[in-house]
Amino acid sequence: MFTRRQLLSSSLLAPLVALMPSAAQARVSTAAKKTKVCALTAIPVGTGKVFTVGGAPYLISQPKKGTFKAFRASCTHKGCFLPSPAVGKITCGCHGAQFDGLTGKNVAGTQKHPAELLPNLAPVPAVQVTVDKTSVYLTV
Ligand code: FES
């Protein structure tokens, strides 16, 4: 019978242990990445736009001067792509749910799916947005 220490230090497991990433390497591979998305001027105060980062759509808005918010632009009903807001609201093209274009909060449930009308949905998930003097960045 081997102790755990003997087993881990044995020559049988050494090649397998050598192939395993260290805890630090594992953290690096799953760490979020900061990506420059656009110029500050691309999102005027009181508006929002959808940008693609790493193949996924994100809504970035500026509700108040200098305050930016970002959300995954996927509907919380069944995951359809959400377009850029029109007149402050985002309307999902699949079943008509509406979200606030500045906060991502659900403001109306599904409208076009009679078998499954839902009055309220979860807000779209927020993501980290940062700015500097000229640009907007997402960390995803
Ligand atoms: S997927 Fe958006 S309302 Fe159904």
Image: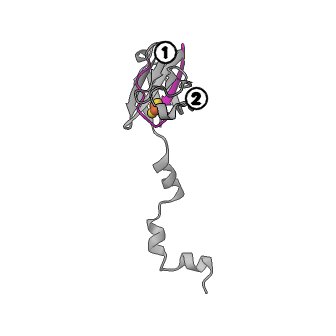
The residue that mark 2 highlights is 120
Q: Contact (CB < 8 A) between labels 1 and 2?
A: no
**Residue 25 vertical position relative to residue 78 in the rendered view, above or below:** below
* Region in magenta: 64-85
Q: Secondary structure at mark 2?
A: loop
The residue that mark 1 highlights is 88
Q: Quadrant of the N terminus?
A: bottom right
Q: Compute the Cα span from label 1 to label 2.
A: 18 Å
Q: Is residue 52 left or right of residue 140?
A: left
Tell me which amino acid carries mark 2: Asn
Categorize mark 2 by other alpha carbons within 10 Å: few (<14), some (14-19), many (20+).
Answer: some
**Residue 91 vertical position relative to residue 22 in the rendered view, above or below:** above
Is any atom of residue 75 visible in this view?
no
**Residue 80 vertical position relative to residue 9 in the rendered view, above or below:** above
Given residues 85 and 35, the one toward you in this image is: 85
Q: Where is residue 134 drawn, in percent x and y?
A: 44, 19
Quarter location, residue 6: bottom right
Q: Is the image coloured rainbow, by chain, by secondary structure, or in one colour?
A: one colour
Indicate whether residue 83 is drawn in magenta. Answer: yes
Is any atom of residue 68 visible in this view?
yes
